[in-house]
């Protein structure tokens, strides 16, 4: 079984666990883009995606964040760093329900919301990422908020570069 990691600094893993994030974008490596694209997007680029529709994937969490491992794994590398955890030990899994390839800036408002962007009304439109006291206000529209989030997660200028992305839609496996 494969695992997938989400950024904890901005609460992306928690958003997945709470069901507020049901889509993720992963930048297509340039070598794949070079192989598959010529003058226009090649629809077969999806063949290079890391995951497949229907595949069940473990959501990586540090062992310290999983109650049943709170006394077992304190000396392992995965205790604090989820990069080193074993997929089969992860309690939360997702099923990939759809995959598409698109340029980052082609994201729809609907897909921004699936990426975990939330809306707060009020005297002005405000879109944010987070929950409760950890809200991070990001913009005045879903796309503006997502652009700010992707630059925080993937590095400043990512939105502007407009790379091809694998867009994975998923559901939590019960």
Image: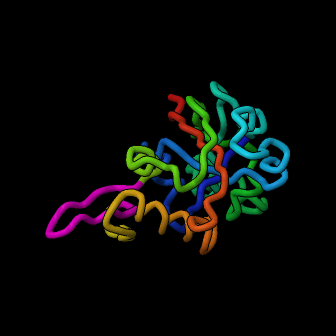
Q: Can you give x and y, in whole percent of width and height, for residue 104 in the image?
A: 57, 54
- Is residue 129 located in the magenta-colored stretch of the structure? yes
Query: In front: 124, or 63?
Result: 124
Q: Is residue 78 left or right of residue 115?
A: right
In the orientation shown, which residue stands out farthest toward the bottom?
156
Q: How is the image coloured?
A: rainbow
Quarter containing the N terminus: top right
Query: In front: 48, or 83?
Result: 48
User: Number of labelled discs?
Assistant: 0
- Is residue 57 located in the magenta-colored stretch of the structure? no
- The picture quadrant where one finds residue 80 is bottom right
Q: Which residues are magenta?
A: 117-131
Q: Can you give x and y, in whole percent of width and height, for residue 8 in the image?
A: 56, 62
- The picture quadrant where one finds residue 139 is bottom left
Q: Residue at x 77, y 62 (%)?
A: 75
From the viewer's perspective, is residue 161 above or below residue 60?
below
From the viewer's perspective, is residue 8 above or below residue 72?
below
């Amino acid at each position: 079984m494969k695992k997938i990691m989400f950024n904890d600094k901005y609460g992306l893993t928690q958003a997945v666990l709470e069901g507020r994030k049901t889509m993720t974008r992963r930048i297509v490596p340039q070598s794949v883009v070079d192989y598959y694209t010529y003058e226009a997007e090649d629809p077969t680029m999806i063949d290079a995606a890391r995951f497949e529709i229907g595949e069940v994937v473990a959501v990586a969490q540090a062992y310290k964040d999983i109650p049943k491992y709170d006394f077992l794994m304190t000396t392992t590398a995965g205790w604090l760093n989820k990069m080193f955890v074993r997929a089969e030990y992860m309690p939360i899994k997702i099923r990939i329900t759809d995959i598409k390839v698109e340029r980052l800036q082609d994201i729809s408002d609907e897909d921004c919301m699936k990426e975990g962007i939330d809306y707060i009304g009020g005297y002005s439109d405000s879109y944010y990422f987070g929950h409760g006291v950890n809200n991070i206000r990001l913009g005045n529209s879903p796309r503006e908020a997502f652009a700010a989030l992707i630059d925080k997660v993937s590095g400043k200028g990512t939105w502007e570069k407009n790379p091809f992305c694998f867009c994975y839609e998923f559901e939590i496996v019960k």
